[in-house]
Amino acid sequence: MSSSKEMKIANIPQMHVKRLIEELTPAYCNIINAGLPIKVFPSVMLWGPPGVGKSQAVRQLGKEIEKNTGKRAFITDVRLLLFNPIDLRGIPTANADKTLAVWLKPQIFQMDPSEDVVNILFLDEISAAPQSVQAAAYQITLDRVVGEHKLPENCIVIAAGNRTTDKSVAFKMPKALANRLLHIEVEGNFKSWKEWAIRSGVNDKVIGFLSFRQQHLMNFDSGNDDLAFATPRAWEMVSNILNYVNSDVDKMYSLISGIIGTGLAIEFRTWANVYDDLPNIEDIFDGKQPKVPTGTDAMYALCAAMTAYARNHKDDMRRIANSVQYADRMPPDFSTVLLKDYMYIEPDYRTKLLRIPEFSAWLSTKGRLLNGTV
């Protein structure tokens, strides 16, 4: 298997999704709030293996821009692999007196130029597009121009693609295009993913298993010909099956195998059996204080199940307080993991927790452990 070092792109920064958002949000928002043209900031190119979270990062960036500018953000997702150079320019038609050709603007570039709007043009799979299409993207990335059509001043341009080492369809990017972009390599990171997963309602069995086996978040290997493998995107698909089809991992095993592969699906199914021996989550939040399990795998499952329940009852602070009181009986490392996960439920949820006497009591005895948790 290729080492992670070999898979890196030399000479550009590597960032996980959370850090990427933290870096780009103030860059764009400072420019937008100052009333400056967005084009003063270079177009961004996100590199990374399939399923690492590039598209998710763009969606999160749109939400952050909305929150920090008060404007509405609209994302136009363009898969350049499906286009040819003529598609990008538009369809030719005759002018009124039939003496000249007029290029009709493609619908995908029809954007709202209003001052209360920020458009994000996301050119996905740019590295998979033939070089003739990549060349047509020159104007978009630098001049914000598509053929004869100009993008509105309120348009951010972000491109994304797989690396040539990923064994996906990928053409080497021409130097002239590469020099027009700010390049960032997106890498998998469990802490970043877990915070997003809890806040987004990813199934607790998926979160619990990956907390127990963090190395399985991203099993992509360009040297392997397997069609099904684990990535953040693949685990989100597994979560959707468990959330919306059937939560029984055993019954959904075949479908899950088709997403992450049979070997990992077997391990996931075996691990999910620990849920049968967990205390009743409802009893914990009712304040009945059932017995605390002892196995490491069961503790990860319990933390994930309690966090999912807490997320769905986040405003019932009496029940949350009961669960914090139960957490005080858990091994210190796991009670710390649990309460740190609670803080991911929504922004500033820690402020709500601080109003609970049980949480303040927990902080006084175990709060020092917070900085060292996984």
Image: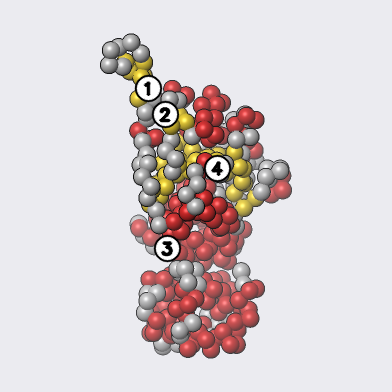
Q: Residues within 10 Å of mark 1 (few under 14, many from 20)?
A: some
Residue at the spot x=55%, y=42% of the render? 40
* Percent x, y of residue 257: 48, 51
> How far separated are the C-alphas under marks 1 and 4?
28 Å
- Amino acid carrying label 1: it is Trp
Residue at the spot x=56%, y=44% of the render? 41
| Residue at disc 3, secondary structure | loop
Residue at the spot x=65%, y=50% of the render? 14
Q: What residue is shown with label 1?
A: 103
Disc 4 or disc 3, which is closer to the eye?
Answer: 4
Tell me, yes or no, whether the two marked residues, 1 and 2, touch with CB atoms within 8 Å: yes
**Which of 369 and 237 lies nearest the eye of the viewer?**
369
| Residue at disc 2, secondary structure | strand
Q: What residue is shown with label 3?
A: 201
Disc 2 or disc 4, which is closer to the eye?
Answer: 4
> How far separated are the C-alphas under marks 1 and 2?
9 Å
- Amino acid carrying label 3: it is Gly
Tell me, yes or no, whether the two marked residues, 4 and 3, touch with CB atoms within 8 Å: no
Q: Is residue 183 positioned above or below 96 on the image?
A: below
| Residue at disc 1, secondary structure | strand
